[in-house]
Amino acid sequence: MRLDTGRLYAFAWRNAGRVPGSVLRGVANVAADVAWAAHGGGIRQLEANHARIRPELDARALRRLSRAGMRSYLRYFVEAFALRSSTPEQIDARVSTSGRDRLEAVLAGGGSVVLSLGHLGNWDLAGAWACRNIAPVITVAERLKPEEVFEEFLAFREALGMRILALGDGDVFRDLVRTARTPGNIIPLLADRDLTAKGVEVDLAGRRARVAAGPAALAVTSGATLMTTVITYERLHGARRKAAGTPWGIHIAFGEELTAPQGASRSEQVRALTQLWVTQLEAGIRRRPQDWHMLQKVFVEDLDPDRYAATLAREASA
């Protein structure tokens, strides 16, 4: 019998909030350990990515890290499913920050901020918190299949206060530019993977990798400020744990404003800014590699050579 993924996700989003958090976390850990033990393609890719980020680790340490990584990954899902039923006070208690003053200074000065994010920690919780405590959040989401999964996903994030633009629906980049030129907006973009084959090749942990051009291109085109943002999990204790209703929270580290080289062409500015945020993101991943939920191919050496050569040929002829 074929599993109906759409119905499963819809059921989880609608009902996870009714299940005790300890039960959800237990189920997530079991599911993570089962997937990890099966050692399928996604787990092997996760370990390969970890090996590039932490080359000093031996095979046994990498296996331990990938197990922790899968537990972090599944924790994100069960937290996301239950987030809509969390109280505003619980959301606030789950989040700590550093560098927040930099972000708020730009917003207070009448600007908007583009945040370059990786698939780290719980970005949905971060978005819900930012909507409540800082400014409106507008972001982009990949259109998922089946359609009902995407609709549930869209309703979930919009219920948290975020505005979502779907890739493929009209001119998303133009909408983002308009938003970035409007004062007082936060535009977080997950960009540590190239989904469009129009990305930028950068140095990541001493190896070549493909990431999205979006954050840098948006900042260069709109004039908005670009900051790297690293979201990682942290254990909660005492009064904060009680207020949060969970043993896990997140830390959001807002980086410094990134500046493109003056006098360079637009493409050179995009490449330079992209390398800057990737370098800062790499430092965050090294600190908490288990929170980097990257089970896909990012490094060039993992990509299909023929397809990648075709991608480079298209870029050269553009």
Image (cartoon, rainbow, N blue to C red):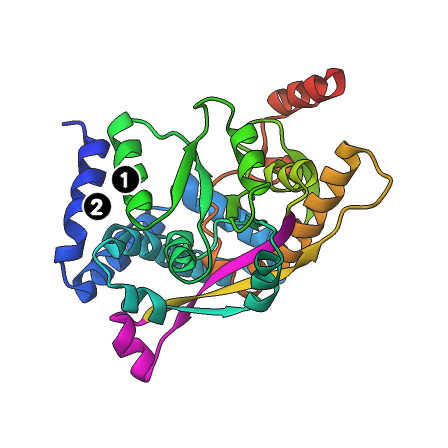
Name which residue lies at 63% across and 20% down: 306
Name the side, left or right, on which 133 lies relative to 262: left
State the residue lying farthest toward the bottom. Answer: 238
Report which quarter residue 126 is drawn in. bottom left
Q: Secondary structure at mark 2?
A: helix
Out of 70 and 245, give the one closest to the viewer: 245
Q: Which residues are magenta?
A: 225-247
Out of 198 and 258, give the one closest to the viewer: 258
Task: Inspect the image, locate mark 1, and give the three-letter code of the amino acid beneath it.
Answer: Ala
Q: CA distance from mark 1 to mark 2?
A: 10 Å
Q: Residues within 10 Å of mark 2 (few under 14, many from 20)?
A: many
**Image location of residue 75, percent across then percent down:** 32, 57
Q: Looking at the image, is 274 positioned above or below residue 50?
A: above
If the image is split into quadrants, where does the N terminus sit? top left
Out of 181 and 114, give the one closest to the viewer: 181
Q: Which residue is mark 2?
A: 13
**Image location of residue 16, percent across then percent down:** 18, 52
Report which quarter residue 256 is drawn in. bottom right
Q: Looking at the image, is 118 positioned above or below residue 98?
A: above
Name which residue lies at 61% across and 63% down: 105
The mark nearer the N terminus, 1 or 2, is 2
**Image location of residue 45, percent across then percent down:** 49, 43
**Image location of residue 261, percent across then percent down:** 82, 46
Name which residue lies at 25% across and 37% down: 152
Q: Is disc 1 in contact with disc 2, using a CB cutoff of under 8 Å?
A: yes
For residue 155, the mark is 1
Name the side, left or right, on which 126 lies relative to 307: left
Out of 219 and 183, give the one closest to the viewer: 183
